[in-house]
Structure formats: C-alpha cells, structure tokens
Image (cartoon, rainbow, N blue to C red):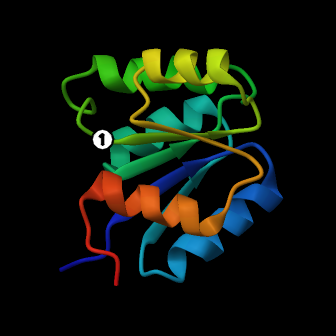
Amino acid sequence: MSAKKILIVDDEPHVLEVLRVTLEDFGFKILEAMDGEDAIATVQEQRPDLVVLDVMLPGRDGQEICRQLKASSDTAAIPVIMLTARSGPENEREGLEAGADAYLTKPFSPLTLLSEVHRQLQLEIA
C-alpha cells in the first residue's frame, strides 16, 4: 500500500515543520501550502487523501477553502481537519458548518492529531 498523502496548510513555517515531521514519522507523504490559493491548487493537482487546514490564512481563510473543497464533487470526499488557534464552541461550530470533518485547536498534542488523522483515514493505529 502506498503512503497516504496529507496536505498541511498553515502560514507559519514552524507549524508546517512540526506537522510535517510528526506525520512523516508515521509514514505519511506530506504536501505543504502556506495560503488558500496554494491549497486549492495542490488539492486539484495532487489529490491528497486528507487536508490539515489552518483557519487564519492570508487572503482566503481556511473556512472559505473548506467550503470550496466540500462544494466540489471532485474534492468533497477528502477529509478536512481544521487545526487552528481559534478555540471556543462558536469557532468550532463555524468550522464544522464550513464542512470540516474535525476541529482541533493549537497548541495541539501530536498524539491527538495522529489519532484524528487515523480516524479520518480509517486506518488502524500501529
């Protein structure tokens, strides 16, 4: 079985690095984008198996990107995990209403993230 591709979208390089290292250590192939436009282009070109998406991005925010992905029949089935500093029930509700399959807040536990990635991809945890 080939490695599952995960697109991580965040405008903070250190967050991208932590996410990349965490997920690569568990055998995932990582794609990266730093803004919404790059995220959409990468999804269309690379067809990742899952997207980890920050809400606060330059230009179009993560909720808008999520809505666009979920509105297209080509990308609607790709799970989206929002990973953001925006905490609280109202923010979580907005993220889920935008179409996110899960909503995690920063700072995050790598174990919680990995568990959610496995759940969304319906993988067994080794």
Say what secondary structure mark 1 lies in. loop
Of residue 19 and residue 11, the one placed in the foreground of this image is: 19
Provide residue 98's location: percent of width, then percent of height.
46, 17
Is 78 situated left or right of 9 in this image? left
Where on the picture, by quarter, is residue 17?
bottom right
Rendered residue at 73%/28% (across/down): 56
Question: Is residue 60 something one can see in this rendering?
Answer: no
Provide residue 78's location: percent of width, then percent of height.
30, 41
Rendered residue at 29%/57% (across/down): 121
Is 119 situated left or right of 14 in this image? left
Provide residue 109's location: percent of width, then percent of height.
67, 62
Quarter holding the C terminus?
bottom left
Quarter holding the N terminus?
bottom left
Q: Is residue 121 above or below residue 79?
A: below
Q: Which residue is mark 1?
A: 78
Rendered residue at 74%/29% (across/down): 86
Q: Residues within 10 Å of mark 1 (few under 14, many from 20)?
A: some
Provide residue 64's location: percent of width, then percent of height.
54, 17
Question: Is residue 103 something one can see in this rendering?
Answer: yes
Q: Amino acid at mark 1?
A: Ile
